[in-house]
Image (cartoon, grey):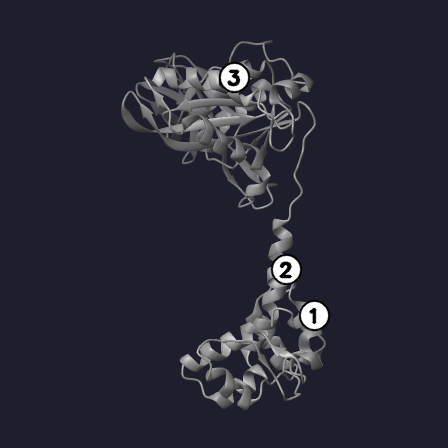
Amino acid sequence: MDDLLHAPPHSLTGEGEMIGFDVGTEIHARARRGEAKQKIARELGVDRKTVRRLLAQERPMPYQRMVSRPALVSPYLPSIQRRVTAVDYKAYRIFQELKGQGYAGGYELVKLAVRPLRAERDRLAEATVRFETAPGRQAPVDWGSTWADIGGQRMRVQLLVRVLGYSRRLYVEWTRDQTLGSLLACHQQAFDWFGGLTEEILYDNPKTVVLKRDWDGRGREWHPQFWDFAQYYGVTPRLCRPYRAQTKGKVEAGIKYVKRSFVTGRQFPSWEALNWMAQEWVLTVADPRCHGTTFRKPAEAFGEERLRPHHGHPPYRLSTVLGRKVATDCLVTVETNRSSVPPAYVGRTVEVHWSAEGAIEVYHQGPLIAPPLRPRASIRCA
């Protein structure tokens, strides 16, 4: 029955042809539900004697029909082929349409006809071509999580991996969390590790990067501090399509490689030693290995990367981002510090950036809406 749509109508039940295993399985399943043999034969388009013979078997087996009678769905196979994509391969929707065209069979036979078409769609969707990038173009980044033996204790640790898309050279850093502060700090360390920046950085839609987005990525709301960070360094953030794991295959493979080759079976004397040992492992093991996809050593291919220098300005100043609702007096408060915002933002939630020195900046969905405020100052709106 899997070849239902590739066979001419008369071959479905013609003399000397075989009944598919799926049909035999369906006959046994319907019989177990208590359906009458006559109803099964009618809806599946087989002879009642064939149904009896198949049910006499202990398990479904291919059966050679001796009666030549076209299956009820056979004349409608071209229509099914034309309509499946339009109705998103919904067999019941096809069944309803066929009934309006005079189809007298049952839903199960239609479902069996749609099944191989859906399987072919899924097979083609999984057959992806590996996406390669030019030198210096893109670096996918992602988090991982695993257990590690640190100081004799088993601890859950977070892992950030950044992969240069062209050379496959890795940056690895272990953290205690996956917060925005940790993400941006790891980025700055990675910039120093590689000695420059790629044009783009690819992410898998974490909330620390994008607050919300639509399916095709055209409408998105970036996390304000992350966006400020990206603009500061002049890099373009890119987002993977949701539920499209192949897009970030390079970094996912990198995370698996780090866990398998560096973490498994290894003991770390302290938390501080974890990152130091990881960097040594990258230099002595990961960089000089022959990569399984490119068949090149990442350390050698790295010489062809065209990274943009990033030392033209000081490191980005990290700050804590807090959500605050603007009060009716146009003020937002952080501890003893208050900052005024335009009256248009009363009742809205804004993002307050609070630096380690206590300076406050107020943003709303990206733009700065209040001037920087020094600690313990208070300014009311006019």
- Image quadrant holding the N terminus, namely bottom right
Vertical comparison of 365 with 136: above or below: below
Tell me the crowding category of disc 2: few under 14, some 14 to 19, or many 20 or more residues within 10 angstroms, Cα based: few
Asked if the residue under mark 3 is in contact with the one under mark 2, i.e. CB atoms within 8 Å, the reply is no
Q: In percent of the image, x 37 and y 15: which residue is there?
A: 273
Q: Residue furthest left?
A: 153
User: What residue sits right under mark 2 in the picture?
Assistant: 120
Task: Give the Cα distance between marks 2 and 3.
Answer: 45 Å
Query: Is 173 situated left or right of 134 in this image?
Result: left
* Mark toward the start of the polypeptide (2 vs 3): 2
Disc ID at residue 34: none
Kind of residue sitting beneath label 1: His
Q: In percent of the image, x 46 and y 84: which residue is there?
A: 56
Tell me the crowding category of disc 3: few under 14, some 14 to 19, or many 20 or more residues within 10 angstroms, Cα based: few
Of residue 208 and residue 112, the one placed in the foreground of this image is 112
Vertical comparison of 137 with 79: above or below: above
Tell me the crowding category of disc 1: few under 14, some 14 to 19, or many 20 or more residues within 10 angstroms, Cα based: few
* Mark toward the start of the polypeptide (1 vs 2): 1
Task: Give the Cα distance between marks 1 and 2.
Answer: 12 Å
Q: What element does badge 2 sit on? A: helix
Disc ID at residue 284: 3
Disc ID at residue 6: 1
Image location of residue 368, percent across then percent down: 51, 24
Q: What element does badge 1 sit on? A: helix
Identify the image quadrant of residue 373: top left
Image location of residue 338, percent across then percent down: 36, 20
Kind of residue sitting beneath label 2: Glu
